[in-house]
Amino acid sequence: MAAPREHVTAEIVALGTPEVPYVFTATPAGVTGTWDYADARWAGLMAAGTVDRTYRLVVELHDDGTYSLTDHGSASEARVGSTGGGGFGASYSSTRFRGTVRSKSFNRSYSPIASNHGQVGHTYGWRFDSDEMRAPVKAVLERNGWTARKRGLWARLTGQG
């Protein structure tokens, strides 16, 4: 038998300690975890830019003792500066994702002026592994008798159901 929803929700929210880079908040449907893993601004001699990347894990707790995990990702990047051939240009890109993802990424960059999550210096970068947030959540759910809701391929790819 699955532990009560309130107990599981409180246990997942408690995973967001100061030692980890993400936070969890309770929602009417379960819990949402948020990790702002890249928030950097940089400026060099001939160029400048910004990077912002966020990952959200939505945990839905269903009345039948099952759970669903849906990944949400967003990334944006803007650059202004030299194009390398003596020209000058600007670019902006933005992507969003919803579904199931296993992702790892890292970056370490140097520039004369940089800020990373508000900290000023000469470097910026990030380290991200979606399993770092997913694994402890799944462990709490399974330890408390909750089972993953079976979904078809389309529902897993689109984050529905």
Image (cartoon, rainbow, N blue to C red):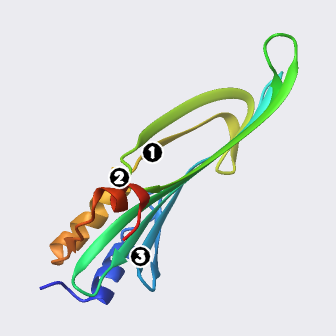
Residue toward you, 53 or 115: 53
Quadrant assignment, res 58 = bottom left
SS of the residue under disc 2 = helix
Say if 131 sits above or below 46 in the image: below
Q: Which residue is mark 2?
A: 132
Q: Residues within 10 Å of mark 2 (few under 14, many from 20)?
A: few
Q: Earlier in the sequence, mark 3 or mark 2?
A: 3
Location of the C terminus by quadrant is bottom left
User: In the picture shown, does residue 125 fall above or below 72?
Assistant: above
- Residue type at mark 2: give it: Glu
Q: Residue at x 88, y 16 (%)?
A: 87
Q: Which residue is rendered at x = 11% and y = 85% of the image? A: 1
Badge 1 marks a residue whose secondary structure is strand
Q: Is residue 73 left or right of residue 104?
A: right
- Nearer to us of marks 3 and 1 is 3
**Circle number at residue 31:** 3
Residues at marks 3 and 1, CA–CA distance in whole angstroms: 20 Å
Contact (Cβ within 8 Å) of mark 2 with mark 1: yes
| Most foreground residue, 153 or 20 | 153
Q: Residue at label 1? A: 128
